[in-house]
Image (cartoon, rainbow, N blue to C red):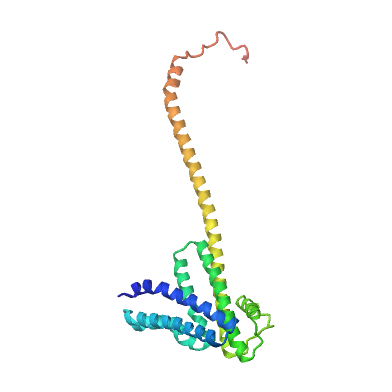
């Protein structure tokens, strides 16, 4: 079993676990059910957590350079360890972003834009869930889901009106991560737009160069054709000059000349 093969095997189970977690956690935070339904939702969250734990352990065991893999996949470790704290369990959803990112890496610009848009909406949504879960339990000002959505949008765009501010440690950690995500996504959008502009300018320059080369080739063809025509006409001109008699000299003195 190679690491690449395990990734292909575990990719869809991880996506299913991420979607299951997102739906379950959304119901748990927004609806806040009690009793048997609440216990069932908690069990489903533990099932999704177990899926991520198994993937992390297997990947670490079969990695050819374990320490290098461990150091370069600390975020994967965070999705397993940190979600033990309830609001930070949304980190499990980064598996969806990882799959989208691998797809976008092989995609054209339009698909990258779709990825960025989807990633932004997903980050805003999960951050809203996490901050609502943290602040509602900690006595903060964010106590409804619409307030959480509003706070997430103003934070990820780095606007920050200040009308809603997290007061818990977990809420502030989520805010920092959301602001960094906003800066990163803005950089991706700017880079994509700049790449599009460069491509348009390059295409226009290429078109102009192609037109110039075509004009030069046409002029060369015309010059070659004129040379061929002149070469054919040159013997005929020489023959016509040979057959033309020279002009006769006038008889007598020049009437215009005067003698001194």
Residue at position x 33%, y 82% in the image: 61
Describe residue 128's horizontal placement relative to residue 45 as left or right.
right
Percent position of residue 202, x then y? 52, 56
256 is higher (above) or lower (below) than 18: above
108 is higher (above) or lower (below) than 57: above
Quadrant assignment, res 253: top right
Describe residue 124's horizontal placement relative to residue 69 as left or right.
right
Looking at the rendered image, the quarter that the C terminus falls into is: top right
Percent position of residue 242, x then y? 43, 17
Residue at position x 44%, y 14% in the image: 243
Describe residue 186's horizontal placement relative to residue 106 as left or right.
right
Quadrant assignment, res 15: bottom left
Looking at the rendered image, the quarter that the N terminus falls into is: bottom left
| Closer to us: 235 or 50 | 50
| Closer to us: 83 or 23 | 23
Considering every residue shown, the one lying at the far front of the view is 36
144 is higher (above) or lower (below) than 187: below
Quadrant assignment, res 194: bottom right
Describe residue 180's horizontal placement relative to residue 231 as left or right.
right
């Amino acid at each position: 079993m190679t690491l690449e093969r395990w990734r292909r095997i575990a990719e869809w189970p991880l996506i299913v676990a991420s979607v299951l977690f997102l739906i379950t956690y959304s119901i748990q935070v927004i609806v806040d059910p009690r009793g048997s339904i609440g216990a069932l939702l908690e069990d489903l969250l533990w099932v999704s957590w177990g899926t991520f734990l198994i993937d992390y352990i297997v990947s670490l065991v079969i990695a050819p350079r374990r320490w290098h893999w461990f150091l370069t996949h600390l975020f994967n470790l965070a999705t397993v360890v940190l979600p033990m704290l309830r609001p930070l369990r949304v980190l499990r959803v980064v598996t969806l972003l990882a799959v989208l990112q691998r797809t976008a890496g092989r995609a054209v610009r339009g698909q990258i834009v779709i990825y960025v848009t989807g990633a932004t909406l997903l980050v805003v949504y999960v951050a809203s869930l996490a901050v609502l879960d943290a602040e509602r339990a900690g006595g903060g000002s964010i106590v409804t889901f619409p307030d959480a959505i509003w706070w997430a949008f103003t934070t990820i765009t780095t606007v920050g009106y200040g009308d809603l501010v997290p007061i818990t440690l977990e809420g502030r950690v989520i805010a920092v991560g959301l602001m960094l995500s906003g800066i990163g996504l803005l950089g991706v959008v700017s880079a994509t737009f700049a790449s599009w502009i460069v491509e348009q300018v390059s295409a226009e320059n290429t078109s102009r160069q192609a037109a110039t080369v075509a004009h030069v080739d046409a002029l060369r063809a015309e010059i070659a054709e004129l040379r061929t025509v002149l070469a054919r006409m040159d013997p005929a001109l020489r023959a016509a000059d040979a057959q033309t008699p020279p002009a006769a000299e006038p008889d007598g003195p020049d009437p215009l000349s005067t003698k001194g």
